[in-house]
Amino acid sequence: MQGIWTTEQVRAAETRLLARVPEGALMRRAAYGVAVRAAELLTLHTGGVQGRRVVLLVGAGNNGGDALWAGAFLRRRGVGVAAVLLNPTKAHPAGLAALRRTGGRLLEPSECAEWTGNADLVIDGIVGISGKGPLRPDAAALLDTVSAPVLAVDLPSGVEPDTGAVDGPVVTATSTVTFGAYKPVHVLNPQRCGDVALVDIGLTGELGEPALLRLDPADTASTWPVPTPSDNKYTQGVTGVAAGSAAYPGAAVLAAAAAVRGKAGMVRYAGPAADVVRSHWPEVVATGSVFDAGRVQAWVVGPGIGTGREGTEVLAYTLGQAVPVCADADAITIIAQQPDVLDARDPDTPLVLTPHDGEFERLTGAAPGHDRVAAVREAARRFNAVVLLKGHCTLVADPDGRVLVNKPRGAWLATAGSGDVLSGLIGALLASGSDPWLAAGVAADVHARSGELAARGVPVSASGVLAAIPQALREVRALVG
């Protein structure tokens, strides 16, 4: 898994490392990484480096120093470099001296718009991980004149580093170079960061346990069950699906089909849409009621069951069966309206809740807000459950405080029925015996990959996402050999 550390953790690690290395060494190492990425972007967008024009937007502090040193390195490669000092009295002295020694220009206010408007690349060194709040008006006005790609130093200026929140004018970067560790902003607001390159400056041994984790393909591939010669349909896991209604059978079809596509050994459907589910997926063992569904290793409950008496009885029954439960959609609303339904659950039995923002607010009494990580972590603790908070960046929190961040792959999953597919995938993994936190995170990863594959640049339906699941699984396995 890929670790992500808070700004407080990173600053503490940098302080410990700085005590052991020569003064200025870390900054020059970081700045060299910025210069290398800048040269790559210049080559990509203009075909070369020699003679190109780069503008540095330089704020106070170390990020401004990184930008100035990077400008000095670029000058040595024949790049025309000019710096806009947004706070001249607080510009980094050593970085400023290095830029001047190599022939870099310091722009007068009257020159700034012409240079930024005709630059081949702009380097954002306005604020660093200690900065708070949006861009100030003078910096925001300057950014309005930029049409070139923007390379951010550590993070796009104006974006809150630990939450990714935006509250006013900010930089939208084509690419970001970060140092020593990924920070929350890089995974919580990737649309502002662009692609993120990590430069090793020697922090690894100083960082401690990460605050967040992100799955890599090896995690997904190793978690997804693969049948062995000794397996049968029962040992691979039997997933129960309690979803849909006679009037709205679609949720039942999608959730049950996703469990099938997710390689559950057997899928048992229980509910009023049994005939429709059977007609679409004859391999599903379907019955009209959860009370005579037969034995399962995990339940998916909630999509389309309604929030009245019958839906409540179905939820209470599944919670009382001493097997892991993925509760989605109407099940979450029932829990929000009737919290005592959770009394049917053995506290030691795994429960996965999968709310979107509106359901999260109903469930907890408050919207996730700008600090989504803190909100989902608290909800997991409060309900003693794994909580998967849907969104552009899906978050998965365990009651023990662990949080997974799912890498966004576009907004293709914002379509009716997509959540039913995700629930079915989670149910298949729960039935296989996977750790519930990891099962939810890995299912979200495959779900997102499936959406990306199905869409191919155009809107896609939940059925399209469902059809792409096998290909997504094949591609994950291919990535790790």
Image (spheres, rainbow, N blue to C red):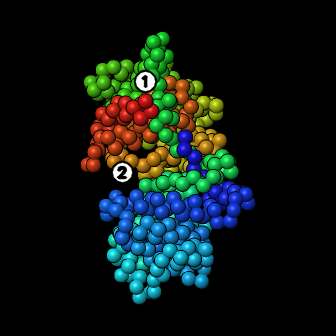
Q: Is 288 placed left or right of 56 in the picture? A: left
Q: Is residue 84 above or below residue 122?
A: below
* Residue 380 at x, y percent in the picture: 59, 44
Quarter of the C terminus within the rendering: top left
Q: Quadrant of residue 465?
A: top left
* Residue 474 at x, y percent in the picture: 37, 30
Q: Which residue is mark 1?
A: 264
Observer-nearest of 109 and 312: 109
Q: Is residue 336 above or below residue 424?
A: below
- Crowding at mark 1 (Cα within 10 Å: few <14, some 14-19, many 20+): many
Q: Earlier in the sequence, mark 2 or mark 1?
A: 1
| x 53%, y 76%: residue | 101
* Residue 250 at x, y percent in the picture: 31, 36
Dots 2, 1 in contact, CB < 8 A: no
* Residue 461 at x, y percent in the picture: 28, 42
Observer-nearest of 476 and 249: 476
Observer-nearest of 130 and 202: 202
| x 56%, y 73%: residue | 98
Q: Which residue is mark 2?
A: 411
Quarter of the N terminus within the rendering: top right
Look at the image and tell me whether residue 111 can be seen: yes
| x 45%, y 19%: residue | 227
Q: Quadrant of residue 347?
A: top right
Q: Which mark is residue 297?
A: none
Which amino acid type corresponds to the residue marked 2 in the rendered image?
Ala
- Crowding at mark 2 (Cα within 10 Å: few <14, some 14-19, many 20+): some
Which amino acid type corresponds to the residue marked 1 in the rendered image?
Ala
Q: CA distance from mark 2 to mark 1?
A: 27 Å
Observer-nearest of 89 and 256: 89
Q: How many marks?
A: 2
Look at the image and tell me whether residue 375 can be seen: no
From this viewpoint, which residue is outermost toward the bottom? 110
